[in-house]
Image (cartoon, helix red, strand yellow):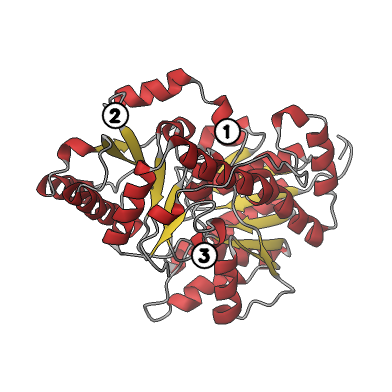
């Protein structure tokens, strides 16, 4: 698109811009929309990621759209209606339920195009919850972030193939690239987390909340230590924000102490340099107790060529090929998890590297941020009859040194991992 050409205005709406997959997805699309010549707006409450919106070429509008009450949704619908009119918004992209209800009302009133992305699991345990969830299936196009989510939307909400688009999340391989992480970045984290030079790091990224599986990880670590399954000197680092009251983090600390793991465990809190954290690690674990709708940390670890050990449910069944690009264990099975951990630590560096390289190759081929950005721009083009993808491709072709080539076979000469037999404890479900 030239400067004089039609510039679609895309407004993304979400509760806040603090941290998480929804927020990062919004920022990634701000970048792509701006690069393709459109105007990128984000309406949300404040948060630590707000400065990134303008840095990436967009504009942030401060609106508290997380109010779930009927009166709050109506109030926000009026605010969004005014914003749509003032900014000439062409399409609204909703990424969360309360903002989506307000946006849908505003879009219907202003005859503005409306797209939704279903990011979460969103249970239906309480009366009316399915109706509340259903707003995320009401867009002209409904984006599912994995095949796992797409099957649910088709089965439970009747979203047909005419509207349903599967666009997996991805890793930003400009950032998650082991060749680009300097040693001083890794050393800074090792010092901050009190990791000795001879300690193998098991990294568990994820918000400190019960369903992410930190307590299960402690159980698995205790089994591995008690059974003396590895003679390696290891430490496990939990990275991620906790709840405001921090009660769960305190319970985890007490559990680690009761299991005799105090000297083996670190709680790193929020980490702003996850690429360096993964470079420091020998293995990354994602033992979620509930199915992950996608699990971005899995593909980020894979992009860093790190073996991953992941609970075998949800979208992990798409991103991890057992024994090739990572390891799967039955969800909730601490002993199977411990056996996987011990095997990974006991493998040779060459064996771990081979699995890590297979995993990175799979990310480069299927799960990059650019693949997601391009596919989402294509959805906008479907609806608006715009030329976002063409303009974006032209922009990237002029900046090829800073981007992963989309659709280009980046296949590398990768050895086959040879240590799976010693760590597979039996059937993986």
User: For this rendering, which residue is in front, 288 or 100?
Assistant: 288
Q: Secondary structure at mark 2?
A: loop
> Pointer 1: residues within 10 angstroms few (<14), some, or many (20+)?
many
The answer to whether 303 is drawn above or below residue 209 in the figure is above
Q: Are the residues flagged by discs 2 and 1 in contact, CB closer than 8 Å?
A: no
Instruction: Answer few, some or many: residues within 10 Å of disc 2's Cα (few below 14, many 20 plus, some between 14 and 19).
Output: some
Q: Looking at the picture, how far across and down is residue 66, in whole percent?
A: 45, 56
Instruction: Name which quarter of the figure residue 126 lies in.
Output: bottom left
Q: Of helix, strand and loop, which one carries label 1?
A: loop
Residue ID for mark 2: 193
Identity of the residue furthest to the left in this view: 258
Mark positioned earlier in the residue sequence (2 or 1)? 1
Q: Residue at x 46, y 32 (%)?
A: 279
Instruction: Tell which of 51 and 124 is nearer to you.
Output: 124
Q: In the rendered image, which quarter contains the N terminus? A: top right
Distance between the alpha carbons at the discs numbered 3 and 2:
47 Å
Specify few, some or many for label 3: CA neighbours under 10 Å numbering under 14, 14-19, or 20 or more. Answer: some
Q: CA distance from mark 3 to mark 1?
A: 45 Å
Residue at numbered disc 1 = 177
Front position among marks 3 and 2: 2
Q: Nearer the viewer, mark 3 or mark 1?
A: 1
Residue at 53% x, 60% y: name it. 119
Q: Is residue 344 left or right of residue 98?
A: left
**In the rendering, which numbered label is found on residue 74?**
3
Inspect this view and state whether residue 204 appears: no
Q: Earlier in the sequence, mark 3 or mark 2?
A: 3
Instruction: Report the Cα–Cα distance between label 2 and label 1.
Output: 22 Å
Place of residue 33 in the rendered image (x, y in percent of width and height, measured from the top left): 72, 43
């Amino acid at each position: 698109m030239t400067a004089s050409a039609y510039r679609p205005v895309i407004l993304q709406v979400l509760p806040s811009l603090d941290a998480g997959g929804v927020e990062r997805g919004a920022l990634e699309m701000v970048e792509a929309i701006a690069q393709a010549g459109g105007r990128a707006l984000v309406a949300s409450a404040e948060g630590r990621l707000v400065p990134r919106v303008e840095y990436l070429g967009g504009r942030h509008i401060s609106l508290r759209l997380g109010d779930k009450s009927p009166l709050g949704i109506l109030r926000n619908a009026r605010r969004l209606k005014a914003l749509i009119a003032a900014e000439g918004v062409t399409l609204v992209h909703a990424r969360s339920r309360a903002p989506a209800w307000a946006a849908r009302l505003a879009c219907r009133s202003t005859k503005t195009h409306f797209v939704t992305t279903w990011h979460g699991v969103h249970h239906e345990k309480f009366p009316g919850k399915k109706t509340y969830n259903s707003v995320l299936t009401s867009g002209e196009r409904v984006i599912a972030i994995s095949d796992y989510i797409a099957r649910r939307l088709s089965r439970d909400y009747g979203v047909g193939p005419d509207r349903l688009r599967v666009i997996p999340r991805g890793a930003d391989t400009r950032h998650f690239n082991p060749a680009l992480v300097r040693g001083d970045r890794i050393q800074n984290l090792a010092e901050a987390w009190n990791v000795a030079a001879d300690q193998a790091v098991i990294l568990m990224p994820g918000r400190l909340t019960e369903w992410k599986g930190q307590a299960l990880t402690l159980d698995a670590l205790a089994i591995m230590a008690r059974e003396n399954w590895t003679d390696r000197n290891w430490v496990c680092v939990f990275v991620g924000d906790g709840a405001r009251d921090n009660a769960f983090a305190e319970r985890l600390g007490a559990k680690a102490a009761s299991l005799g793991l105090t000297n083996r465990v670190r709680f790193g809190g929020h980490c702003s340099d996850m690429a360096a954290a993964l470079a420091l690690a020998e293995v990354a674990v994602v033992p979620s107790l509930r199915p992950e709708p996608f699990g971005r940390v899995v593909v980020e670890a894979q992009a860093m060529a790190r073996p991953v050990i992941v609970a075998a449910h949800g979208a992990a069944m798409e991103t991890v090929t057992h024994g090739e690009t990572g390891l799967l264990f039955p969800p909730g099975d601490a002993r199977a998890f411990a056996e996987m951990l011990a095997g990974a630590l006991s493998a040779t560096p060459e064996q771990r590297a081979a699995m890590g390289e297979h995993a990175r190759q799979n990310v480069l081929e299927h799960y990059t941020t650019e693949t997601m950005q391009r596919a989402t721009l294509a959805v906008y083009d479907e609806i608006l009859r715009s030329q976002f993808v063409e303009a974006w491709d032209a922009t990237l072709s002029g900046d090829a040194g800073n981007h992963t080539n989309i659709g280009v076979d980046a296949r590398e000469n990768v050895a086959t991992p040879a240590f799976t037999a010693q760590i597979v404890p039996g059937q993986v479900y």
